[in-house]
């Protein structure tokens, strides 16, 4: 089961990362350490959610769409590291744009994962 408060915390952290990345994009700046550490904390939360969600999925008796849940659980934790790696390697302002899209994608995926669990 996806815990509501964990999901909201992850969504909030990802949206803060989205806004911060958008500000960096507008200011034509590259990613820096405070943003990296925020996203690292969100990533740790995502990994914990993947582990907890996998265990809950294996033990649940409710009618949860297992294939969709596994897909979201398998992919949500990959988005931020790929976005951060791409943003760190990008020398132009669009590195922050890639990071902004990655952060927003994580927020949407966590929200969708929460919807899947509450529908089941």
Image (spheres, rainbow, N blue to C red):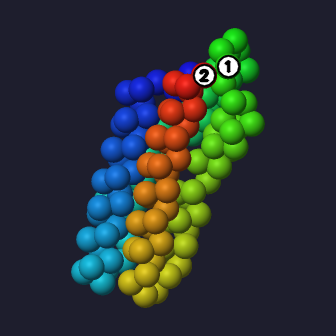
Query: Given contact means CB atoms under 8 Å apart, are the residues at marks 2 and 1 in contact?
Result: yes
What percent of the width, then of the height, locates residue 95? 45, 77
Q: Which residue is mark 2?
A: 120
Q: Residue at x 55, y 73 (%)?
A: 86
Residue 32 in view (yes/no): no
Q: Residue at x 69, y 30 (%)?
A: 65
Q: Secondary structure at mark 1?
A: loop
What percent of the width, then of the height, locates residue 17? 35, 57
Label located before the other in sequence (2 or 1): 1
The residue lying toward the viewer, choosing from 20 and 109, is 109
Q: Is residue 114 above or below residue 71?
A: above
Give the number of callouts. 2
Q: Residue at x 64, y 40 (%)?
A: 73
What percent of the width, then of the height, locates residue 75? 65, 49
Q: Quadrant of the N terminus?
A: top right
Q: Secondary structure at mark 2?
A: loop
> Few, some or many C-alpha atoms within 10 Å of disc 2 (few <14, some 14-19, many ≥20)?
few
Q: Quadrant of the C terminus?
A: top right
């Amino acid at each position: 089961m996806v815990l509501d408060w964990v999901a909201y915390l992850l969504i909030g952290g990802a949206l803060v990362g989205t806004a911060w990345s958008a500000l960096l994009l507008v200011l034509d700046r590259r990613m820096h350490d405070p943003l990296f550490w925020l996203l690292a904390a969100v990533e740790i939360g995502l990994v914990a959610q993947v582990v907890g969600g996998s265990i809950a999925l294996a033990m649940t008796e409710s009618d949860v769409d297992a294939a969709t849940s596994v897909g979201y659980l398998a992919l949500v934790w990959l988005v931020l590291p790929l976005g951060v790696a791409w943003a760190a390697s990008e020398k132009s302002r669009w590195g922050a744009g890639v990071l902004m899209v990655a952060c927003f994608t994580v927020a949407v995926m966590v929200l969708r994962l929460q919807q899947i669990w509450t529908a089941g």
